[in-house]
Every structure is written in structure tokens, then in C-alpha cells.
Image: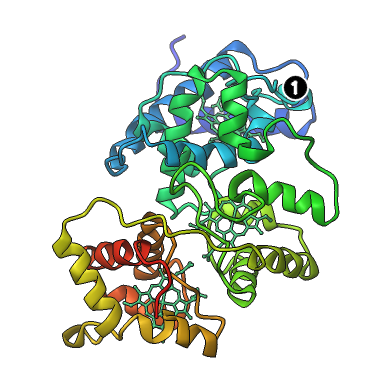
Amino acid sequence: MMLRVTWRRVFLGLAGLGLGGLLFVFSGLFNVAATGGHWAVTDWLLHGAMRSSVRTYSLLVEAPPPLDDRALQARGAGHYAEGCAPCHGAPGAPQNPVMQRSTPPPPDFSRDIEDWSPKQLFRIVQHGVRYTGMPGWLAPERHDEIWAMVAFLRLLPELAPEDYRLLADGEMAGRPQGGDGFEAALASCARCHGRDGLGRDGAAFPRLAGLSEAALLSSLRAFAQGDRPGALMQVPVQGMDDAMLQALARHYASQPAAAAPGAPAVAPAVLELGGRIAREGIAAAQVPACLSCHGGAARARNPLWPRLDGQHAAYLETQLGLFRDGQRREPVMRTIGDRLTEAQAKAVAAWFAGQAATP
Ligand code: HEC
Ligand code: HEC
Ligand code: HEC
């Protein structure tokens, strides 16, 4: 006897299969233990799906900035040591053995890293990988931070252990880390900012020395409360209480400022435009003079207005971009960021970086 295929039978058959599957899962016979690892077929399916998804969605990613930039690599490395190495390992620092036992285990980058393009790496780092424990970026809109991580990941396979430590830990390389109390906290900040607050590797980290205690504390609180998105700073301050933030702000405020880093190589006309915006603002666009708040006399009146002179141009420009797109939300600067064009922001940032002490 031949069984005739009808829609009704197909439907009943599928429903039966689904019901059987559900029964199997909820009967408790389906084995969720991670100890056996995935079956080869599950592994192939999951990783295959991941590869295809990454390939497709990476088509939407913007063009990368130049990635062979030491400042970018250092910024990525500083975060990698804290946020990624426990799972993925690093040169001279093998994976945490507990993580090796998760399913699937995080790939061990201390040995090798698969050949992903920069845009594909961006996609993986920004969104993570579902069903695997690979987390997405804490501040997914901070493309500048994610590119810094991509720049570092591209360099990682070539790094000798000593070079890795230097890039990740700066002056704290090779020194014991961890523990509680002020000294341990300061040591964790010093990996990126140095104990003197002057940073390292060019413009990798903003200068903290020379900023007022009030401005430093206001920034630290904004990171700790999630008001100022940025994985690189949110991770180090998470779990610190306000007394510790105050102590750290006090430490960095007491460090002497250094000579200005100098304006980046831009045309004289650009610097001139930047100086004019700082002194006079842009009347037509209703942009006030920056120095009316960021100049020395104004800062003496209100220590919450941060100094910009002596800061790296790249940092200032990035922050103006964050005000423009609403990631930093302080209302006055949010409006000013919105009214400055990218070219004007670049010019005024370059001008401030070349100033020793503004009037
Ligand atoms: C809790 C552990 C964990 C942490 C923390 C973690 N990852 Fe992963 N990561 C994984 C796992 C598991 C996979 C495997 C995903 C897969 O096989 O599809 C993975 C995959 C990746 C991949 C794809 C590699 C490949 O060859 O398939 C990259 C790139 C990556 N992680 C980068 C990072 C970066 C950068 C960080 C830090 C910001 C990070 N990961 C933090 C667990 C982690
Ligand atoms: C992984 C590197 C890294 C570590 C560790 C780190 N920082 Fe930062 N810090 C940065 C970066 C990068 C920025 C710029 C943030 C941005 O662009 O959002 C920053 C910004 C800041 C700012 C804001 C400066 C301003 O002008 O508004 C302060 C204050 C600060 N850090 C203090 C600290 C303190 C205190 C610690 C230790 C608890 C610390 N940082 C740990 C990388 C780091
Ligand atoms: C009315 C006062 C005021 C004026 C005018 C002003 N700012 Fe600000 N600016 C602030 C305050 C307040 C902050 C701190 C914002 C915060 O806490 O997030 C700030 C922060 C900044 C920052 C971030 C600094 C850091 O260390 O993170 C930049 C960059 C900046 N301003 C650039 C400018 C520029 C460029 C102009 C002129 C076009 C300007 N500001 C005009 C008040 C002002």
C-alpha cells in the first residue's frame, strides 16, 4: 500500500517530530553537560553559522582607520590584558584553565588567531558570538575603541611575550598586579596612564596630569555610572567605591602638567582657524568662544571646566565627535559638538594641543 502525501499528513508528521523533540529535551535525556564538548556536527554547524554570519554582517562595517598606528595598538592591548586575555590567553600568558573547559573553548590567541579581515574582526568584537560565551563590546557604539582592539588583534600573532607586556602594561610590565587598596588601584590605572598621568605611546591615552581634581572626579563618576560610555574606562572603575575614585582623582590632580604635546602636522591656516574658534567662537553658528570656559581664568572660577591645552589633539577630536553623536551627554558641550563641523573640531583640537597654558 502506498501512503499518499497530503498537506495534512506532512503537517501532522512535522508536528509529531517537533513534539518528539520537545519531549526529548524536557524528559531530561538531552545532555547539556559541557564536559564532552560539542559533537563534531554541532561544532561544524555552529562555527559554520558563525563564519557565514560574520562574513555577511561585516559588509555593513565602515572602512577601517589606518591600523598600523602604535597609539591605537597600545589602547587595544591595555584593554585586552584585562578584558580578553583571561579567556583567550596572550603571548607568555596562557589561557585560564577554567575557561579552556567551556564549550566551545575560547580560541587560544597565545598560539594562533584565525585569518579574519579587519571588518570581520570588528563585527565579532562589537557584537560577540551567541551561544559561545564570547561577549559583545560593553559600549557597542564606541567604534573608535573597537578599531583600537582590531588594530591590536592584527598585531597579536607577531608579538613576543616581552613586547606584549610592554604594549599592554606600559611601565607596570613585569610588576605584580592585583589586590585591593589604593596602591593596587593606582597600579591598575598606571598600566595605561602611568603613575604620573602623562600616558604613553604617543596619543594612546589622554593626559590626566594638569586636570583639576573636580574635573577628574566628574569624569570618573560618569564612567562608573555608565553616563559616559567607554569600555576602556568602564572596566577599570567598575566596583570601585566613591572614596576610591576621590583618592585617584586627588592623586592625578597633584601630578605636575608637562609641556604641551604640540599640534599635529596640519596646515598653518587650520591652526589659525582653530585659534579663532577658541578665542571668538563662530557667531554665525552660535558657537561660543571655547576659552570663555576652557581658558585659565574661567577654570579658576569653575574647576569643573576641564583644561584642554596640553591635551592630545586626537583625544580632543574624538571627544568632540562623541558630544556630536550624543554618546557624551553634558548638555552645553552636546550642543557645541553638534554645531561644530568635523573640520572645525579638528582645527580647534589641533590648536589646543599646541598651547602650553591658555590665558
Ligand atoms: C568569557 C570568555 C570570553 C571573553 C571574555 C572573550 N571571548 Fe572572544 N571568544 C570566546 C569564545 C568561546 C569564542 C569562540 C566563538 C566560536 O567558536 O564561534 C570567542 C571567539 C572570539 C573571536 C573569533 C576567533 C575565531 O578564530 O573564531 C575573536 C576575534 C574574539 N573572540 C575576540 C575577543 C576579544 C577582543 C575579547 C575582549 C574584548 C574577547 N574575545 C573576550 C570567549 C571569550
Ligand atoms: C586600558 C587602559 C586604561 C586603564 C586601565 C585606565 N584608563 Fe583611564 N582612560 C583610558 C582611555 C582610553 C581614556 C579615554 C576615554 C574615552 O575616550 O572615552 C581614559 C580616560 C580617563 C579619564 C578622563 C579624562 C578626561 O579628560 O575626561 C580619567 C579621569 C581616567 N581615564 C582615569 C583613570 C583612572 C583613575 C584609572 C584607574 C582606575 C584609569 N583611568 C584606568 C584608558 C585607561
Ligand atoms: C559654557 C562653558 C563651555 C564652553 C563655552 C565650551 N565648553 Fe567644552 N566643556 C565644558 C564642560 C562643562 C565640559 C565637561 C563635560 C563633561 O563633564 O562631560 C567640557 C568638556 C569639553 C571637552 C572634553 C574634555 C575632556 O577632557 O574630556 C572638549 C574636547 C571640549 N569641551 C571642547 C570645547 C570646545 C572645542 C569649545 C569651543 C568650541 C568648548 N568646549 C566650549 C564647558 C564648555
Residue 159 in the image: above or below residue 187: above
In the rendered view, tell whether residue 345 sits above or below residue 113. below
Rendered image coloring scheme: rainbow
Horizontally, is 333 left or right of 344 in the view? Answer: right
User: Which quadrant of the frame does ligand 1 lie within?
Assistant: top right
Quarter of the figure with residue 60: top left
Q: Position of residue 196 (x, y in %)?
A: 63, 54
In depth, the one of 83 and 12 nearer the eye is 83
Tag 1: amino acid: Arg
Residue placed under numbered mark 1 in the picture: 101
Helix, strand or loop at label 1? It is loop
Label 1 crowd (10 A; few <14 / some 14-19 / many >=20):
some
Marker count (numbered)? 1
Q: Is residue 32 above or below residue 278?
A: above
Residue drawn where x is 57% and y is 50% of the image: 232
Residue positioned 71% across, 69% down in the render: 250
Q: Is residue 16 visible?
A: no
Q: Residue at x 75, y 15 (%)?
A: 36
Q: Is residue 201 left or right of residue 38?
A: left
Horizontal arrangement in the rendering, residue 117 relative to residue 30 (left or right)? left
Q: Nearer the viewer, residue 32 or 61?
A: 61
Q: Quadrant of the C terminus?
A: bottom left
Coordinates of residue 29 in the picture (x, y in percent): 78, 24
Is disc 1's CB within 8 Å of ligand 1? Answer: no
Residue 247's spot in the image, x, y percent? 76, 66
Q: Residue 231's spot in the image, x, y percent?
A: 56, 52
Residue 358 visible, this angle: yes
Residue 262 figure quarter: bottom left
